[in-house]
Image (cartoon, rainbow, N blue to C red):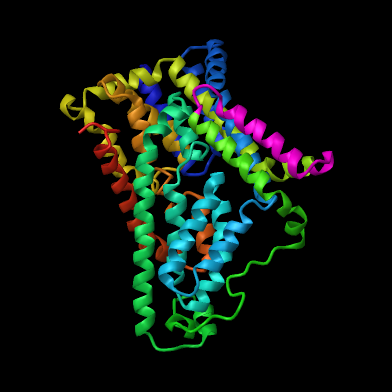
Amino acid sequence: MLALLGLCTILLLLAVILSKRLSPLVALIVIPVAAALVGGFGLDTGRFVLAGIQNLAGVVGMFVFAILFFGIVSDAGLLDPIIDRILATVGTRPSRIVPGTTLLALLIHLDGSGAVTFLITIPAMLPLYDRVGIDRRILACAASLAAGVNFLPWTGPMIRASAALKLPIPEIFAPLVAVQAVGLAFIFAVSYWLGRREERRLARAPRAAPEAGAAAGTGAASPAGTGAPLPAGTGARTLTEAERALRRPDRFWLNLALTVAVLGTMVLMAEKVPPALMFMLGTALALMINYPSVDAQRQRVDAHAKAAILMASILLAAGVFTGIMQGTGMLKAMAQGAVAFVPPGMATHIPFVLGLVSMPLSLLFDPDSFYFGVLPVVAEVAHQLGVPPLQVAQGALLGQMTTGFPVSPLTPATFLVCGLTGIDLADHQKFTAPLLFAASVVMTFACVALGVFPL
């Protein structure tokens, strides 16, 4: 009975989220509470909910203050010298421009927001791509590769995996550092290959007016594409008056030291110092250093509060779902029923197989329905067969809404990429999805080679 009730709960949750009949926030609260009441748990439902929310308190705190911290130091101009240096260094050779785009997107994605990464990277690089005549699909691909492989402790998928399986983020992330390094090496190699291929194409293409390539966005050649010098300031960015008013260039080194201290402490001393505390202290110090007045501090918090509150509310709602699913025993009953269908000899390969299919699953499941609906069941099945849930979480993070999110029609960021570059969704998916999938596969095999997953 419990297994059937749990299965119906999850299927209904997936159905209403994927069909957009309910928002994830509403679905994660209403459906499990209704299921618990139908199952006869009555007032015990409140106890299950409270336990689920309490388990997520540290994760929610870390995520909220991570968004605020990175937003504040970005407003102060921490990334400006890096962006300007990259634009000045790449010159007019595609074999430098494309890896430079990947590096820029990688650095901007330190805040964990794919939307912010694309909003900064693409407008900054697009004039250069059009002037040189580089195919705009490559710009979309380079930014997507960087954002997809850069799964950090404060990014959405990592936090969802931790919340859904009640696992400490450092335990999930630490073994994946070397794996992520392999993934980063792969995407830079791909970026260089794309740039070299574009250089050869431009060398063979007939000369065309720069305006034609820029207007069409098809990668038509321009004089710069064949090595002609670009006019000065081609890659220069223009800040708005409001952005310039927020910049604090005289405090760049202070902000850099603060960022290094926060991230270094979080990575190296995660077991002794809670990540939420580090981001709280970092946010407070960033506000004091850059915006000492109370009004300015309130404005900076207000500017980034929407994104923080939205994600925090979804995570707390997920605590309702996971608390009820575990407290009622529905999750365990479902897993016990599913164990009979998995050959014992294949159990150890569950994380590896999940790693291989996790990127394509991004096209079928949005992050909330996968991490809070599908992943707990898979992890419980694996656990009952002797496979640590930790490895299941790591397998999912190799692709599900990490490498998969920039091409998934289920995330707004995908449409943002297409809109900013002016390319069709189908063209973006056909060009970029195979390379993102390849990155996911490479990292999955790296997990085996580095001992994260068993053979």
The reply, left or right, for residue 441 in relation to residue 35 is left
x, y percent for residue 262: 59, 35
- Give percent across and percent down for residue 166: 45, 23
Is residue 420 in view from this perspective? no
x then y, percent, for residue 62: 58, 31
Q: Quadrant of the N terminus?
A: top left
Q: Is residue 5 above or below residue 285?
A: above
Q: Residue at x 58, y 24 (%)?
A: 57
Q: Is 22 above or below relative to 330?
A: below
| For residue 34, side relative to residue 390 (left or right) | right
Q: Is residue 170 left or right of residue 420?
A: left
Q: Percent x, y for residue 382?
A: 29, 25
- The range drawn in magenta is 269-296
- Is 279 colored magenta in this rendering? yes
Given residues 357 and 109, the one toward you in this image is 109
- Do we see residue 99 in this rendering? yes
